[in-house]
Amino acid sequence: MAVVDKVEPEVRPAVARPRRRRGDWIVRYRRTAVLLDFLVMLFAGALAFVVRFPGVPNTLELPYVAFSVVLPLGWVAFLALCRAYQPRYIGVGYEEFHRVLRAGFALTATVAIMAYATKTEVARGYVVMALPLGVALDVAVRYRLRKWLHRRRWQGDHMRRVVAVGHRAAVADLIRLLREKAYHGMDIVAVCLPPGEGARAGAVDGVPVLGDFREAAAVVGSVGADSVAVLACPEMDGVALRRLAWQIERDDVELVVAPALMDVTGPRISIRPVAGLPLLHVEHPELDGGRKLLKGFVDRAGALVGLALLSPVLLVIAVMVKLTSSGPVMFRQTRVGRDGREFTVLKFRTMVADAESRKQELLEANEHDGVLFKIRSDPRITRVGRVLRRYSLDELPQLINVARGDMSLVGPRPPLPEEVAEYGGDVYRRLVVKPGLTGLWQVSGRSDLSWEESVRLDLRYVDNWTLALDLQIMWKTWSAVVRGSGAY
């Protein structure tokens, strides 16, 4: 196998050359974001002023009029200082919203400190309303702007042009993944393979191979790429990556590196220098202790609140199930929970009363791979049951299971004992946490997912759980339920 010493791209001297311009869509997107940020805070300041000082402004209130006018400019400035307009945060991840919240905290603290230092009397009602309202509205506006960007990306617009560098199989997987998740905005337009791996001919899943590792920088320039994605491979070690970074930095091209360790994200990863080497440290997932207690408290409190608020809906559904088909209102089934403990899950009955006895005659019609049994047009489902399944209303009684402590609000899908009996190897790791009423599987396609993809999502959740991730999944669950995609 080739070693890095044999893959030494020529490091050309830095010469004067035109600086490469980013995509025009990025410039337009940032201008739109700045304008919306300005207008949102202007609206928040004006609304706070009208509510706090109704009527015609008098002389004592004129400073607040001036502050309401200056506030949007200060807000945009603080967002820029907190790097909320960085292109790398556009479109994916929580970092964009995190930086908006950080800017809101910094602006509020600055106003408070300056008021204290100058002994300026500030109407607390005005400040308390203007700043939090402006920040909350701005997060909502940024979210809607991101959704608009996602729609455009699904149409093939506003994409980053990417050159993928790596072995053929890894590049093919990356191409497939990015095509399935186009909202990430990365369009692979060229591939560079290792020397001797057909690096000067052919294509990988329709993407042309334009060179080998030594020619990556030249390929970037020839296709006008915005980013270079380097996949894990022994030929591209630290020295080769550094040389590639030197070659593309003059054109403001982003360099991203995919580590060999997959599905590990968030606070578990940190880079710490050791003896001059930047080492990637991976912490073990925290599945016990204080975080476990916090999750249990949030689960049970949320379940009790949900049962109280949804009790009229539960009553209406129960009456509909009882009146439209014979049999019990509730469907009870044994499922496997944390550490392999079995419990009885509660759901509204969506099938005929003898559905389980008829399952054997339908096994040949199973449309799902792996150990799951799913039929898109299952003849056992009742008319009301089909509606309940489409919008996941049949699962609402599982709030009782959450309140009992058998399940969590968010977690892996609760498996059947016969499914667990067919588990092998890594799949058992799904059972180290409580199953959930919703989860990554719920917001990523539900029954449309393959068995392998479902397992991968559950394992990713187990290894990367945080309270913020739970909140994000619950937020996304609403849109997944309303769309009804993958539910049958």
Image (spheres, helix red, strand yellow):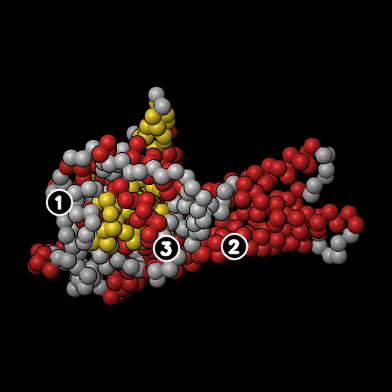
Q: Which residue is drawn at 85% across and 56% down?
A: 61
Would residue 47 be found to the left or right of residue 26 on screen? right
Q: Residue at x 38, y 55 (%)?
A: 220
Would residue 148 be found to the left or right of residue 216 on screen? right
User: Cα distance, mark 3 to mark 1?
Assistant: 45 Å
Q: Residues within 10 Å of mark 1 (few under 14, many from 20)?
A: few
Q: Are marks 3 and 1 in contact (CB under 8 Å)?
A: no
Quadrant for the N terminus in the image: top left
Q: Which residue is labeled 2 in the image? A: 31
User: Cα distance, mark 2 to mark 3?
Assistant: 17 Å
Q: Which residue is labeled 1 in the image? A: 418
Q: Which mark is residue 398?
A: none
State whether residue 32 appears in this view.
yes
Q: Earlier in the sequence, mark 3 or mark 1?
A: 3
State whether residue 456 appears in this view.
no
Q: Which mark is residue 159?
A: 3
Where residue 344 sits: x, y (%)? 26, 51
Hey, which quadrant is residue 34 in on the image? Answer: bottom right
Q: Which of marks 3 and 1 is in front?
A: 3
Q: Which residue is drawn at 76% across and 48% down?
A: 124
Q: Which residue is drawn at 40% across and 56% down?
A: 221
Hey, which quadrant is residue 359 in on the image? Answer: bottom left
User: Cα distance, mark 2 to mark 1?
Assistant: 56 Å
Q: Do the residues labelled 2 and 1 touch (CB within 8 Å)?
A: no
Circle 2: residue type = Arg
Circle 3: residue type = Met
Q: Residues within 10 Å of mark 3 (few under 14, many from 20)?
A: many
Of residues 391 and 139, the one nearer the viewer is 139
Circle 1: residue type = Glu
Quadrant for the C terminus in the image: bottom left
Q: Residues within 10 Å of mark 2 (few under 14, many from 20)?
A: few
Of residues 387 and 219, the one nearer the viewer is 219
